[in-house]
Amino acid sequence: MKTKAYGGDEGSLRQSVNCPLKACIFVLTTQNLCGKHVWNMARTKTPRYLQQRYRRWYAALDIPKDVREFFDKKPRFVQSLRTESQTLAEQRVGPIVAQWKRQIEQARKASNDPSSNQFRLAEKWREELSSASEDERENLEFVLEDVVAAQRLPNEKAEQRFVEVLYGETIRTTEKLDAWISTLSEQKQKTLDMKRSDILRFAERFPYTSDVSRKDLRGWIDHLLQEENLSSATVRRIVSACRGYWQYLQHLQLVTDEQDPFSGLSPSKKKVLRASARTKREPFTPAQVVKLWKAAHAKGDAQLGDLIWCAMWTGCRIEEICSLKLAQVEEDKFRIVDGKTNAGWREIPIHPKLKETFQRLANESADGFLLSGLPDNKYGTRSDAIGKRFGRLKKSLGYGSQLVFHSIRKTVITELERAGAPENVVADIVGHEKKTMTYGLYSGGASFENKRDTIIKLSYPV
């Protein structure tokens, strides 16, 4: 066995051992203990993409099964790195593996990529066929045999896919996505963007409609839940969007309408477990709310401080405060006119502790909003940026994921309950639906005086 020494008494001795199962590397090091040299042997892992055969190093990469036909059905790439030095091998292997991965990606695109020029050509011929008369169709079919042959597609699978597209037996999964979205114009832009994103995710796994089967859908849904760690609610939303789009394709007779492949595949709503109960959103304590308010001002973010101050005396949602216009504010009350529910449209008395702040903000406003200067995001939401600032603030104070801006709203409701406030009046203040027949269906709601007398029960240690 040949050995090579490095660095003298305190150095290391390396040796390679040719094992019939795999190449193993051992490192022998010396320690000077009480004047005696003691050898330690440690086994190190062979670096990724490297193999050692009879002291020479080779680059190696497994070829995925779905593209092996492009590479003479070889199971892997292997190339000599022409060195016995592991250091040199590690330097040389990177560019070689990168090139192999590019070849694999190109093979995948050539066989299955809906955006490839060859498959765009198939779609054009499909349109020609669909608009042709019977006599023209017969003539075209003779031409199409030559068209298919001229593509020189790399394997039988790619050729079959080309023919399916050409004869309209399958389409790109995203081909009618824009048309479908346009039929949903009554929905909010944020909802439409989410649906589009869900279908694009679906199309990544199923590029063509003929790729979709119940078995593979079930595997994809399991992947979303287990590998991508999405919640059951999120996966149900994705499946719902995909089902809606699939039904649209069925309506256009572009896919079979014999069955709904998504039927029964949505993950069920699970009962709340103890672990999920622990992650439930919680209210801040009054002292924590005051700490947040003071911390915002200490960091020089007066606008965030004003937002917190408004929330803690009203129980309003963050967007309700951020979108509140001066025209909705009166001397002793303000109106929420775009609530999430019918109950969200309401009048709220201005707490005495809040009047001075409302007056100052109204005098400073340059754009007609109580909280002036907040930018809209693409969905017209004004609370997005300042909400993120709140998230960074509460995180800096050590508050976890159970405590969010909405927790201030929970604080208001909790404190009013503890002060003995009637539930129906609190519901009218915060904009909650009343579930009872008497108050929910027949009552016109609490009077302004009832709400004013209730809201002044709020107090904080400021």
Image (tube, rainbow, N blue to C red):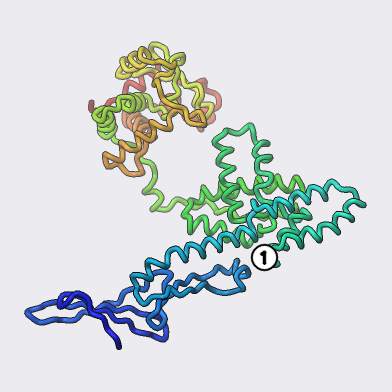
Image quadrant in which you'd find residue 56: bottom left
Horizontal side of 351 relative to 107 (left or right) equals left
Residue 79: image x %, image y %?
48, 73
| Residue ranking furthest to the bottom | 1
- Residue at screen point 48% across, 58% down: 227
Horizontal side of 349 relative to 137 (left or right) equals left
- Residue at screen point 47% across, 21% down: 336
Residue 389: image x %, image y %?
35, 34
Residue 334: image x %, image y %?
43, 17
Residue 371: image x %, image y %?
39, 21
- Residue at screen point 64% across, 33% down: 185
Q: Is residue 395 above or below residue 419?
A: below
Where is the N terminus found, in terms of image quarters?
bottom left
Where is the C terminus found, in terms of image quarters?
top left
Q: Which residue is mark 1?
A: 154
| Nearest the eye: 355 or 54 | 54
| Nearest the eye: 43 or 409 | 43
| Nearest the eye: 242 or 331 | 242
| Residue ranking furthest to the front | 82
